[in-house]
Image (cartoon, rainbow, N blue to C red):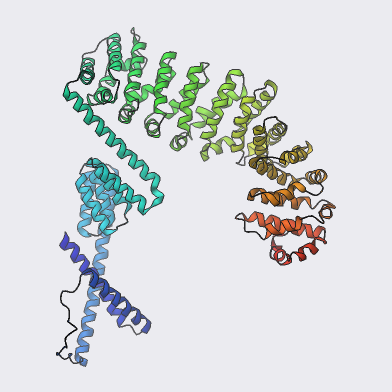
Amino acid sequence: MDKLVDFDSFLRNVDKISELVKDLKSPDTEVQQRAVEEADRFVAVREADEPCRTKINKTKINTNPPPPLPTSSENNNIDDFLKIMERDAEDRSKKRRAKEEKAKALKDKGNEAYAREEYETAAKFYSDGLAELRDVQQLYTNRAQAYIKLGKYKEAISDCEWALKCNKRCIKAYLHMGKAFLGLGNYNESRNCYEKIVKLEPGREQMVKEYQAQVDLEEERDRQERNAREEFDKGEEKATTVPQLLEKLSGPSQVPLYYYGGLELLSQAIFNCTGQTLFRLNNGFTIISGNDTVRSCLSQTSREPYSRELCLSVLKLWRVICNRNDENQKMLMICPVSSKSIVGLLASEHVSVRLECLALLRLYSQTPHSRSLVIDNVNLHMLVKNLMACILKPEQQQENIALTILENFASETKFRMKLRDLFTECIAAPFTTKLRDINRYSEHILQSLIPIIGSLAKDDVIRHNMAHCPNCWEGFLLAMKQCGEGDYKEIIYPMLGLMFNLSTITSRTIQEHAVSICNWCLGLLHDDDGKNRSRAIGVLSNILPQSPAAIQHVVQGGMVSTVQCLLKGAGPSTTKYTIKSLAVCTAVSHLARQEMVKSDKTLCTLRHLLDSSCDEAVLGNAGLCLGHCVEVEEMASNLLGSDIVLLLLRHAAGDAKNTAVQQNAAIALGKLCRAEPRHINKLRELHGLEILHSCMKLIT
């Protein structure tokens, strides 16, 4: 292998020298000069890598005279030699291209075999490709991946090392090498490989964390099994009891009462990690799931006495063996019998079975790793449907656990993505049904369920579907009406939050209901709860731009004067939403501008925002709103003597990241000077004409 690599290196050097000689002969002096410099660098690099073994001692006088200059015939010989070298370089270049095509074709065949899970065949194709060319990084990493599937971890590591010789920044090489070291149980080396990926590409930190978490899980599993075997070998009673009970349970088929008693004893015997590990090492999962009597009870088809008790004992045992044990959680969830039973039993007619099943699922919902196991291995359609059924049934203990489980899973991006096609049927439909009929019991449920829906709506597809769903907004409208009539205040705040998130999307459905929604939000601006007021103005700021009819309705309803009062002493969020709403209203409605000027003749509120706010969204909308207001007759004259020119000029010439701040300030300044030319004197005094001139293209 070393000789082949040296030979390939030699051929590459010959190609390089041939190119340099060709450039040295070029009639273009610039090309010749660049070739000389490149030749010097090439020689220097070669000298650094492989120092010359013989050197002239320059401290002595060289008595040998230099050779005579070549004659014309010798020059012809040199030219012939160079031509031969050029032809040789071209031939070898053609041969390499042919080899590259063969290697690529073999790599593609290997990829196809790998996709069919024919790993031996894939490895052979990659090897044949490497026989054509020894310096193709992809062939090494692909073969390493195939070797990992075959359990040939040492061979995989060797291939990764060769890939790194081809490309020292090869991320795939470090990734596969980490997997191979993990397969060999060399956990520290595996972590080191993953850490090198982060050093090369810091943006892959999240991916590396997931792989390192897998290393931690494997190392913990190895430690648990080693400790369990040691305790079992010592013959301690607490370590031998679990295998003995499992042996008895694996006997010929018995009645449910027999297994019920045995599983109860087994649950009591497993009280630490050693017991959990011994259960796994002694085929405990297979013994339980492979028992016909147990399976019939889990499928709820058995009518024998103690069937329900046996079902409960199995669920309890699973919870005991999986508590804080990642490997057992994995073994249980990848077993089709257990994963199907856990989801199906959520719909059991027995409350005790549903509660035990919910307790097990709550255990799985507590960590990202265990949540991922559930998402990847269960029927999500059935899981979510049954969880919603548990939430909507009038049994408080049950609904609280189901809400906690759904809330935990809603935090997972993968869960939200897989729920996209199921959301309308499994969640949106029962949710909107509950919105239409609020009572004291459902108020308690909706108070927790609405934020969960909001968490699911972080997914763009789900949020888009909800924003365009007529049933959803009709449910909101009916809920609003009931809140006003029945004093269900506890759901107003979360419902406003969900409506705010959905209304960021422009939809025909929202436009159709905009007047009714805005009318309700307008009423909430007088609410005693400041948080409700803030969210209500937030919803208005999103919906008003979608509906001119809603703008006219709220302006006629006195919104302008109401929100101007709201601005006094308002927090950052409320201020941002309020000034946005005012900007939207004054852009469309002349009445809104008149109301603004009537209640604030010198626009003190807007000037204060321009002077004190650091929020660019607030500054941009304040400038926009002011530009609308100066169009009102005599408004520009009322501002003579104020600091309005200075404020607008400062923002027009500012360096805000949001260019709308400069644009809106420049436009407002132009409108101000056009409406009242005396403001130009102040502009000249501040040397602002040049700034205004540069912004003239923005003025309409």
Q: Position of residue 95 (x, y in %)?
A: 23, 66
Residue 492, compared with residue 240, is above or below; it is: below
Q: Residue at x 79, y 38 (%)?
A: 556
In the orientation shown, which residue stands out farthest toward the front? 59
Q: Is residue 282 left or right of residue 681?
A: left
Asked where in the image residue 236 lies, by quadrant, the reply is top left
Q: Would residue 663 be visible to someone looking at this image?
A: yes
Q: Position of residue 686 (x, y in %)?
A: 74, 64
In the orientation shown, which residue stands out farthest toward the top? 305
Asked where in the image residue 71 lies, by quadrant, the reply is bottom left
Q: Judge by depth and name the residue closer to the eye, 689 or 541.
A: 689
Q: Residue at x 62, y 33 (%)?
A: 496
Q: Would residue 667 be visible to someone looking at this image?
A: no
Q: Is the C terminus in the top left, top right, bottom left or bottom right quadrant? A: bottom right
Asked where in the image residue 689 lies, by quadrant, the reply is bottom right
Q: Is residue 341 left or right of residue 526?
A: left
Q: Is residue 216 left or right of residue 590?
A: left
Residue 324, compared with residue 190, is above or below; it is: above
Q: Position of residue 84 (x, y in %)?
A: 21, 79
Q: Residue at x 23, y 42 (%)?
A: 186
Q: Residue at x 78, y 37 (%)?
A: 558
Q: Position of residue 424 (x, y in %)?
A: 52, 31
